[in-house]
Image: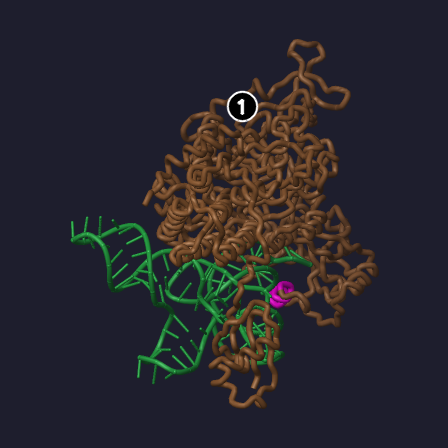
Amino acid sequence: MSKLNYGEVEKRWQKYWQENNINKTDNDFGDSKKKFYILDMFPYPSGEGLHVGHPKGYIATDVYSRMKKMQGYNVLHPMGWDAFGLPAEQYAIKNKINPNIAVEKNVKRYKEQLEMFGLNYDWDREINTTDPKFYKWTQWMFKQMYKDGLAYESFEPINWCPSCKTGLANEDLDGNVCERCGSIVEKKPLRQWTIRITDYADRLLSDLDKLDWEEHIKELQRNWIGKSVGSEIDFEIVDASKNNLKENKLKIFTTRADTLFGCTFMAISFSLAKEWIQNGWQASSEIKNFIEKLEKEEKERTIDFDMSKLEKEGIDTGVKAINPANGEEVPIYIANYILSDYGTGAIMAVPAHDERDYEFAKKYNLEIREIEVQNTDEERKRITDLVGGKIVSKYKLKDWVFARQRYWGEPFPIVFDENRKSYAVSDKELPVILPNVENYEPTDNGESPLANIKDWVEVYGFINGDGEFESLPKDNPKATKFYRETNTMPQWAGSSWYYLRYIDPKNENIFVDKNLEKNWNPVDFYVGGAEHATRHLIYARFWHKFLFDKGYVNYDEPFNKLQTVGLIMAEDGKKMSKRYGNVVNPDDVVREYGADAMRTYEMFMGPFEKAISWSTNSMAGVSRFLERVYNLAEKVSKNPGTDSREVERVINESIKKVGEDIENFKFNTAISQLMICLNSFEEEIKKGNNISKNTLEKFIQLLAPFAVHISEEIWQNVLGNNSSIHLSSWPLFDEEKIKKEEIEMSIQISGKFRGTFIVKNDSSDDEIKNLIKNTNIYKKYILKEEEIKKIIIVKNKLINILI
RNA sequence: GCUCGGGUGGUGGAAUGGUAUACACGAAAGACUUAAAAUCUUUUGCCUCACGGCUUGCGGGUUCGAGUCCCGCCCCGAGCACCA
């Protein structure tokens, strides 16, 4: 037998494909060519290279896109690099090299590995978020948001990671811990750029309904957005001015306005109490200490802290307010279970109808008043109207903290004048290039390392008629001094719109031509990790909707269909990690078994979306399968003539099944069908039956999306075709030929399986009723015909005789 | 606590309400070989010598027929979580 030299075969065909441009995607929509845009979440090119788990999604999109191309679609299947962000910067700090150089090196390594797997990306469309030609448009889009008031400067306390030394968005946290380094984050007041993503909360929520995404991912987004509809109601504060309170009303948010008559006290968060103090409220030292204590406790909470187990604590402010429903005076407490960043930071407490309020009331001996409630929307509306409140929606989603006090990110297209008033820079000034610095180290004071580069920070120019900054030489009499924004954008910026750039990657005038965008968008199929559900996928949807509202894109959702990838775990069931020393290196696998075996195995190992452990044994099994295919091909490559009936049936069945399964991302059963098909071919040969070259060709075509190199080798060098199999047309099947001539029907007696008998395909019920009488099973179980109560026949499947 | 998944052989898994365990891995036996590897052949859910019986986390239900549908539990995974 002839063992293939994988390395040689793979290199030879990869070279051939490149020379013959078979992976190019043109923008030709002239004829009736249907388009298909299939996209991978682009990787962050880390210094460690890929392990066998990383390419699983890329292989899947590769398989899918190859079938679609063979089916006549114009397919866009691009790849690029999400290369801004902390790891590259940390690597740069450690090794004292420019992150640009590290990124370039890592990209090269990643690309080599991806090419090793024979992936069909059109590298002419490659993008990189750190390329100034790319981030020019990230800056330009931010500028549009700035001009629309959607991006604004804020000075609120935000999440601060003391180890990464940067502010973070809620999406960057796991509980109270920095998602990247695991440090407990602090609240730190910091000047920030913030984006009003909450303006889009309702649309982000309701438009989920039109997306063809896995339900659990939609659910994650719904939870993250966390909409609740409730009422805002004002309670009048008794003697507000005597208490030196600025406001004479306390606004609360409740989803249970119907319980308003059961309110016996109120509770506010410690931060609201702090605000009162700042505005002149004379709190006792006891209260001040309590506030300090709560603040300290909040800071010290770690990721596994269970808020619901926290013992309720509070202190009476001595201030009272009036329940607008019944005019009663109720005390106001400061309580540790009131969140400062949700609702209004103040609640009406109804101990009889809320567990938390009940617990609190029990502890502090407050009245628990049972009332009759009608838990309906109508009642809530009625009560809200009665007390002059209003129905509002609240969200858990917070505005997007968009600035990082780090070096390796997109600079903002913003300058400030001497009075710290901000201006967008004019389009002429874009891109604002990230300058080289001596030192990439972040600082403790919340300033970016860029702040130290005086030459870069201080710029001279004027504000033009559009209210935008334009630079001038320093000595120009019209020039005045401005200061650049020194924060940089978060890593999520570039990935929020990168998929648009693949469509028109070299356009210098606009980030994407609107006509091309209309032809290619939306992304038909998006494949990537589920961990992005509440980060990238929310940001990108928001960003896209903004571009849609401004008229730059034609569709209001970017990703029509989303499919998540299941992780590949190590053979020991743990996550692959250097730490455990259980990483399987794809270079080794490809060297030993070939890229095709690895590709095919990763698609065969189980359902695509499920996490599964790597198994070198199973992988070797797939490799054997491919060897058998090659041997069979050599054996029958010259066979003319016709196929046996069974060969004809199994190839038609396989064409149908493999096509449908790839379409549905059920690669494991597609491959199992190819195995069934091969088994059947070998069986037929043993019986002395013929398999024609023509049939074999179809089989190899079905295999081609998976085993891209071997199938090309067989197609051209064994079967003698002289153009690429990947440019051939996907075979068609004949439904009639899939039918078997004879069917094995099962016999049930009173619902119990008793055996089978053979009948002609599509036999009529009467024929079956007659035939069954001759079977041994019938004779054994049916003693008298009069016993039969009923006969159920399911065509070509079974007969059930009830006695 | 809430939400979403999932529970099928020794293992990964397959199954429009219609013969559960396809396909593969592993294991066992055999052929070839001086031998091993590779390859090929056969067996392989459980109980039973067998006839036969049992089996899709547990308990009910609907149905001629349930892994699949309905109700109630248990367990595992993921996400959210004092969200008023």
**Left or right side of A523 for A15:** left
Question: Which residue is more in the foreground, B38 or A250?
Answer: B38
Mark count = 1
Relative vertical location of residue A186 with respect to residue B61 in this rendering, above or below: above
Tell me: A478 left or right of A670.
right
Q: For this rendering, which residue is in front, A493 or A521?
A: A521
Tell me the kind of residue under disc 1. Answer: Asn
Q: Quadrant of the C terminus of chain A?
A: bottom right
Looking at the rendering, the stretch of residues picked out in magenta corresponds to A356-363
On the question of residue A439 being in view, the answer is: yes
Residue A381, given in percent of the width and then of the height, sits at 80, 61
- Left or right of A625? Residue A548 is right
The image shows residue A240 at horizontal and vertical percentages of 76, 51
Res B68 → quadrant: bottom right
Viewer-side residue, A153 vs A760: A760
Residue at coordinates 73% horizontally, 50% vertically from top-left? Answer: A243
Q: Is residue A445 visible?
A: no
Q: Quadrant of residue A729?
A: top right
Q: Looking at the colours in the rendered structure, which chain would you say is drawn in green?
A: B
Chain appearing in brown on the rendered image: A
Res. A379 image quadrant: bottom right
Which residue bears the numbered disc 1? A452
Q: Residue furthest front?
A: A641
The chain to which mark 1 is attached is A
* Residue sitting at x 61%, y 19%: A458
Scheme of image coloration: by chain
- Dot 1 falls on a residue whose secondary structure is helix
**Label 1 crowd (10 A; few <14 / some 14-19 / many >=20):** some
Main SS, magenta residues: helix
